[in-house]
Image (tube, helix red, strand yellow):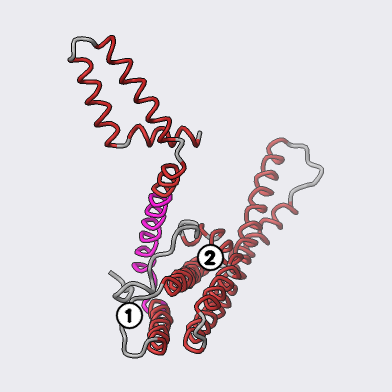
Amino acid sequence: MHFGKYLKAAFLNRWNLLAFLGSAAFALLSGRPDVLMPIVLACEIAYVGLLGSHGKFQNWVDAQDAKAARAETSEASEETLQQILRTLPQELLERFQSLRTQCLDLRQIALDLRRPGIGAPDVPLDQLQLTGLDRLLWIHLRLLYTQYALAKFLKKTSADQIQKSIADLEQQVKQLPSDDQDTRRERVRAALQDNLETSRGRLANLNKAHENYELMKLEIDRLENKIRALSELAVNRQEPEFISSEVNHVASSMVDTERTMNELQFATGLNALDNEPPELLRARTAVVRN
């Protein structure tokens, strides 16, 4: 299957198509298509086979596929970003902006200490750090949105009302004779039991939502502290490799949090957190609501 991908890419290469179609047209117009056309086809098969099996060409095809995949995931992340910016309350946006601004300020200090008075472009390792910080800021922004969505869900759902409904249903079930064989009453009992189980499930889901809301609050505070510590580390330690490893370590520690956010899609409506993060830190202008 993979080799077929390379053969297809080799055949659909525009220069190959141009040469093949031109040669085929010449063979058909030459007056001897029965002789020339098999030669053209044989040359085409040989060329496609050789090019498709060449290691460098296969690497190029894989790189193009990866580039296309990154473009798709980046587009999905950008759509999610705009959805968050349109919905998130101003105070939560300002909380994110404050953290992002501090990262930018501390990063500039680190660059000035490294190269005083020189506005030199970032070195590759610094770009790697920025990619890691972008991911952490992206998680932070989505945490804020998840907390906001859960707050809306909890505000619309009353635990007292559900508990009252459960108590009423339990009372109705108790009032039914346990030894009654009447078919109609058995159907009533089954309907009440099903409704009771549904209400208990709603209450359990609501309690879990409360727990997740508190967890989101704690994770937001923890991640903010981590991001600030990493930004300050860039000023105090001029070791790009160490800082990059620390960024990756913090990102790895958020795996369970990312999984929890993915499980809360029923409340947030966001796509799974498995796409490339948007350039939140590297953008030249602030991330603001449109």
Q: Which residue is mark 2?
A: 157
Whole-percent x, y for residue 87 in the image: 37, 68
Q: Name the side, left or right, on which 267 lies relative to 178.
A: left
When the figure is inspected, residue 197 is found, relative to residue 161, above or below; the finding is: above
The residue nearer to you, when weighing 211 against 138, is: 138
Q: Which residue is mark 1?
A: 120
Which span of residues is magenta-colored? 66-92
Q: Name the side, left or right, on which 170 lies relative to 40.
A: right
Which residue is painted at 46% across and 70% down in the image?
128
Amino acid type indicated by mark 2? Thr
Q: Name the side, left or right, on which 226 lies relative to 10.
A: right
Residue situated furthest right in the rendering = 179
When the figure is inspected, residue 228 is found, relative to residue 133, above or below; the finding is: below
Whole-percent x, y for residue 2 in the image: 50, 37
Q: In which quadrant of the rendered image does the C terminus lie?
A: bottom left
Which residue is painted at 44% across and 60% down in the image?
276
Amino acid type indicated by mark 1? Ala
**One can see residue 152 in this view:** no
Q: Name the side, left or right, on which 135 lies relative to 120.
A: right
Which residue is painted at 52% across and 74% down in the image?
244
Whole-percent x, y for residue 21 in the image: 24, 26
Q: Earlier in the sequence, mark 1 or mark 2?
A: 1
Please state which of the two labelled residues, at mark 1 or mark 2, is closer to the viewer: 1
**One can see residue 194 in this view:** yes
The residue nearer to you, when weighing 233 against 201, is: 233
Secondary structure type for disc 1: loop
Characterize the local packing of mark 1: few (<14), some (14-19) or many (20 or more) Cα atoms within 10 angstroms. Answer: few
Q: Main secondary structure of the magenta part?
A: helix
Residue 225 is labelled as none
Secondary structure type for disc 2: loop
Characterize the local packing of mark 2: few (<14), some (14-19) or many (20 or more) Cα atoms within 10 angstroms. Answer: few
